[in-house]
Amino acid sequence: MNYRHIEIEPVTPAIGATVRGVDIASTLSEDVLDELRHAYHEHLVLFFRDQKLTPERLVAFARCFGEIGYYPFVEGMAGHPEVVEVVKKEDETINFGGLWHTDTSYLERPPMGSVLHALEVPRVGGDTLFANMYLAYESLTPGFRQLLEGLRGVNSAEKPDAAVTRTHRMADKPRDAQDIVTTASHPIVRTHPVTGRKALYCSNAHTTHIEGMSAAESAPILQYLYRVQQREEFGCRFHWEPGSVAFWDNRCAQHNALNDYHGHRRVMHRVTLEGEVPA
C-alpha cells in the first residue's frame, strides 16, 4: 500500500512496524484509519511512540477497530472498566503474561486484538517479544500441515504456568469469573477472517492437549509446534518507553512479556477487542 497519511517502518521482515505521523489521542480520519487497518493486517503488530493517552482516549482509539472486550479474571479501572491495569510492582517476581501466548485463547470467542499503553517502565528490561504465526505455519512441510488439518487444541485458563502470572493482579482486583467458561476448543490451524491466511493457533501457555488425544499423545506434536512458533526469524523485540503503544492481532501473532526487571516497577493500561469464534 502507498501510505499517504502515516509513515510505516517495519521492525523486522517477519513482524511489527513502527507508525509515525499520527497522534492516536486525537480523532482520526477515515483515511488514516484505513491505512492503520491495512498496516495492522500486513505487519500484525503496530508500535507507536510518545503517545499521551488518557484511559478515555485509549478506549476511543481501540474502539475505532472493533467492539471492546474484557479480561475474565481482573476488574478494570475504577471509572474505566474497559481498561485493565497491567502492573508489576517492585517487590514482585512474577509478571503478567510472562510466557508465549495469544490473549485468552481459552475463551469461546478470544479477542481479535489488544492495545497496550506504557505509563511507567524500567529503564532497562521489560521488553516484549512478538512472533508471526502465519510464518510458523507456512514453514511446516506439506505432510505436517496435512496432519494438522482438522485437529483442535483444548485451551484452558488453568494451565499452571499461565495461571500463576495473573496471581498478583487477581489479588488486587479480583473479578467474579465463576460463570465464565474458561476452557475452549479451537482449530490448531485457524484461518484469518480478513486476510484469509492460515496461522498456528496453539500455545504453551494455554493449550493442554489435542482434542480426542491424551496429553501424553498430544505432547510430541504440540511441543514441536511451540518450538517452531518461537523461532527467532519469525519474531521481533520491542523496547518500551513511557508513552509507547503496541496494537497486535491475537489471531495471527503471539507475544511474550520478558520478566527481567526485578526490583523495578512497570505499569501499563490494556484494552482488548472482541473477536470471533476461530475457524
Image: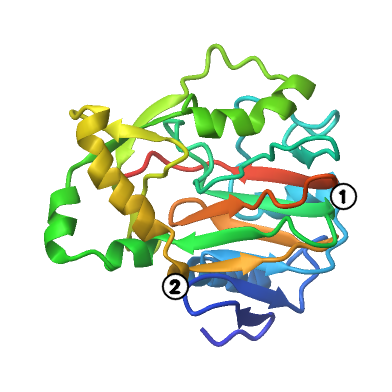
Relative to residue 188, is residue 132 drawn left or right?
right
As drawn, 148 above or below 43:
above
Q: How many numbered circles does the render carry? A: 2
Q: Can residue 233 be seen in this view?
A: yes
Relative to residue 226, is residue 63 drawn left or right?
right
Q: Quadrant of residue 168?
A: top right
Q: Can residue 173 be seen in this view?
A: no
Chosen colour scheme? rainbow
Q: Please identify, in this view, whether the residue under mark 1 or under mark 2 is nearer the observer.
A: 2
> Residue at the location (63% across, 80% down)?
8
> Residue at the location (63% across, 34% down)?
165
Amino acid type, residue under disc 1 in the picture? Thr
Mark positioned earlier in the residue sequence (1 or 2): 1
Q: Residue 167 carries which label?
A: none
Whole-percent x, y for residue 119 in the image: 85, 52
Q: In which quarter of the image is residue 96?
A: top right
According to the image, label 1 marks what residue? 54
Relative to residue 156, is residue 239 drawn left or right?
right
Whole-percent x, y for residue 101 in the image: 50, 46
Amino acid type, residue under disc 2 in the picture? Glu
According to the image, label 2 marks what residue? 233
